[in-house]
């Protein structure tokens, strides 16, 4: 009889999604989250590597929605939970899925008030064998004063001509002087275009050249967006080698405008 029960018992143990640290210890769940779950996160939460908050009903107030879930392959997920290879593995994939989920092109997505954050299991869950990852669309970023409430689902949020609530502006004397705000609020600068600095296979050209190209291209791009006025102010945001190596080839151009 023992021989018959052995296989079902092992199968049951292998399917277990919670482990304990010993007698009397609370179980540690290794169950991955589900796509489509919503959460009420704050700016401090999205700065953390792990998030164990409970999902909320997406019809209620929430600031984050999970749009992708997966598992790190063994070749990436070793024993080191803080290995930079984890983020590098999923960065490009989540960035593309984020854009597809929102329905906007790369330029519109980069100029929106929504971003994405990724999370891995807690230290305890990792030690128990959890190797999942989760990517959330978030109503803002780490530099935001507060995160924006999202609609019941953010799917298709940037399709067509997005509402100004979801486009990025700022209300400062210069770009970078104030946090990004929705363009539906009072503002002095609007992110109006992005410019491409290189092809996917191009090596990083260096900080100085990225800045010089961005300045030159944004001058022309913002002038065109404003209708070629005689005098206008423009600003720009460019990114470093880390972003380049992750696949970003664009800079953001800002126009001084209240519209």
Image (spheres, rainbow, N blue to C red):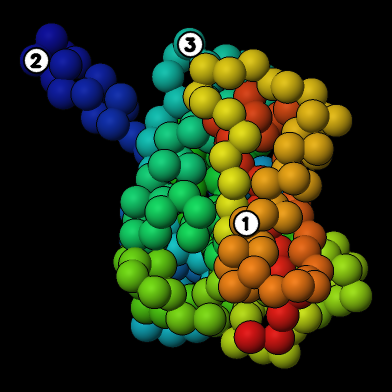
Residue displayed at 30% across by 25% down = 14
Q: Nearer the viewer, residue 69 or 195?
A: 195
Q: Which residue is mark 3?
A: 75
Say few, some or many: other residues with alpha carbon within 10 Å of mark 1 (under 14 / 14 to 19 / 20 or more).
many
Mark 1 element type: helix
Sequence-earlier tag: 1 or 2: 2
- Residue 135: tell me if it is visible: yes
Q: Which quadrant of the view contains residue 177? A: bottom right
Q: Which quadrant of the view contains residue 160? A: bottom left
Task: Check the image and report above or below for 224 versus 32.
Answer: below
Q: Which residue is mark 1?
A: 221
Residue 182 place in picture, x, y as percent: 63, 79
Q: Nearer the viewer, mark 2 or mark 3?
A: 3
Q: Is residue 28 left or right of residue 208?
A: left
Q: Which residue is mark 2?
A: 4
Residue displayed at 90% across by 75% down = 173
């Amino acid at each position: 009889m023992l021989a018959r029960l052995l296989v079902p018992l092992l199968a049951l143990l292998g399917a277990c999604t919670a482990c304990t640290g010993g007698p009397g210890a609370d179980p540690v769940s290794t169950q991955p989250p589900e796509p489509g779950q919503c959460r009420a996160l704050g700016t401090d939460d999205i700065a953390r590597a792990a998030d164990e908050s409970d999902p909320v009903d997406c019809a209620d107030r929430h600031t984050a929605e999970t749009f992708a879930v997966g598992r790190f392959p063994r070749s990436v997920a070793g024993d080191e939970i803080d290995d930079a290879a984890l983020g590098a593995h999923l960065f490009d994939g989540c960035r593309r899925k984020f854009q597809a989920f929102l329905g906007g092109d790369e330029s519109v997505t980069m100029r929106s008030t929504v971003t994405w954050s990724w999370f891995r299991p807690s230290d305890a869950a990792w030690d128990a064998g959890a190797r999942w990852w989760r990517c959330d669309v978030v109503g803002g970023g780490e530099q935001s004063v507060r995160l924006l409430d999202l609609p019941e689902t953010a799917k298709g949020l940037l399709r067509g001509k997005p509402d100004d609530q979801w486009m990025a502006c700022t209300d400062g004397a210069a770009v970078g002087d104030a946090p990004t705000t929705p363009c539906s609020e009072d503002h002095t600068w609007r992110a109006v275009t992005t410019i491409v600095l290189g092809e996917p296979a191009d090596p990083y050209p260096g900080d100085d050249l990225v800045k010089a190209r961005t300045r030159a291209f944004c001058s022309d791009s913002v002038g065109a967006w404003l209708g070629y006025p005689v005098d206008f102010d423009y600003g720009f945001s460019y990114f470093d080698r880390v972003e380049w190596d992750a696949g970003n080839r664009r800079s953001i151009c800002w126009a001084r405008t209240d519209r």
